[in-house]
Structures are given as C-alpha cells and as structure tokens.
Image (tube, helix red, strand yellow):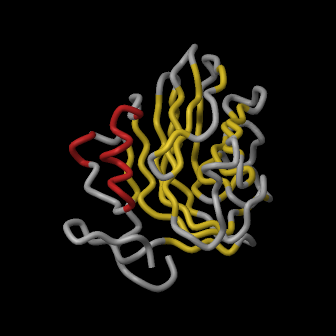
Amino acid sequence: TGPTGPTFTNTRSLSFDGTDDHTRLSSTISLSGTFTLSAWVKPAVLSSNNTNIIGIEASNTNKIGIRSASEVQVKLGGSANHVITGDGSNNFTTGAWQHILVVRVVNSNVTAFRNGVAFGSPVSTGTQTATFNNIGRFNTVNYSEYGLDEVAIFDTDQSSNISSIYNSGIPGDLSSLSPLHWYRFEEGSGTT
C-alpha cells in the first residue's frame, strides 16, 4: 500500500521485484531543458542497479535513481554520471516510504531533495537531452526492487514547490502544478 492522505486518498502503488518487473511507457519522454522528477519510493535494497526510478531500455545512457543511502544518480545523454552525495543526515532507508525530488536546470545544476529537505550539494550539469521510456528498469538487465508511487515529471523547475509536493509526507494533488506526466498507480488491484 502506498502513502495515503485524508483529502487525496491513494491506497495503491506498484511493487517491483528486482528480477523482471518494470513499466514500459507508451512513448519516450525527451527532456532537453529544465525538468523535475518527483516520486514516492519504498526501497527494498539500496544499490546502484536496483533502485532506478526511471530510465531508458536497451541503452546505458539515461537514468535517475537512488545509488545508495547517501547518493542520488542522474545520468543524461550517455555522459558522465551526475551524483549528489548526502552528508549522512538525510539518508534514504530501506522498507519505508520516502519522497524524492530531482531537479535539473540546464547549464546550471542538478539538485535533489529527500522528504522535502535538500539532499547533499548540487552538482554541475550540461545540456544533454534526457530520454526515458521505462519506470523500474534501466537498460536490458537492471530491474528495480522497491515500491513506487506518484511518479511525476515536469518540464519546469519545481524546487520552489517542494513543500507543497512533499506535503508533510502525504502525497497530494499535483494537477495545479501542471506536470508533463503523472503516473499515479492508484487504479485497480492485483498484477499490473
């Protein structure tokens, strides 16, 4: 069960087994400018190959994920990994729902937040285009092992809205922020 709130209830989420589960998007998302990724995650493990949130299939070029308890990895356009390292005071944990927000501002920085609080220091970025077509999978062999819910992608910098997006730990209605894509995972039950 995913995080719930009294005014915007969501009692469902996706659970990925780390072996072969993933969600293929109906079309590839290409982001050449500024963008934001927001998601609720419940990691079963914290490793570079098992906690990718979004990526590209059949390629080693684009992904965003949690690399370890203290690192968020953003890889864009096949160039060098952009890693934001936490200082230990705001680490990701296994077995608990947490919110992650990653913002890339072209020719500026990649920044990250965990549970509404800045995570580590921003790192420089370039103009690489980010392309994604899978949730829970990166290239052809790396599958994620976690619970995932409320994945939203914006083509704007949403860092100034972190408090309303995190919403004190209760996922809220993001429609007023105009996400480019918003995967709620709240419909139906059983295997998707």
Most foreground residue, 25 or 6: 6
Nearer to the camera, 76 or 147? 147
Residue at screen point 78% across, 28% down:
80
Q: Residue at x 60, y 50 (%)?
A: 90
User: Image quadrant of residue 129?
Assistant: top right
Residue in the image at 51% along x and 22% along y: 105
Q: Nearer the viewer, residue 67 or 137?
A: 67
Q: Is residue 162 above or below residue 145?
A: above
Where residue 50 appears, as percent x and y from the top left, is: 74, 61
Residue 144 in percent (x, y) is at: 68, 63
Q: From the viewer's perspective, is 30 left or right of 85? A: left
In the foreground, 134 or 52 = 52
Q: Horizontal placement of 84 versus 116: left or right?
A: right
Q: Residue at x 41, y 33 (%)?
A: 159
Q: Dividing the image into 4 quarters, which one contains the N terminus?
A: bottom left
Location of residue 100 with respect to 111 vertically, above or below: below
Rendered image quadrant of residue 120: top right
Query: Hey, which residue is sitting farthest top in the picture?
Result: 107
Q: Residue furthest front?
A: 89
> Which x, y percent locates residue 54?
59, 50
Residue 186 in the figure: left or right of residue 123: left
Number of numbered markers: 0
Q: Position of residue 78 (x, y in %)?
A: 75, 30
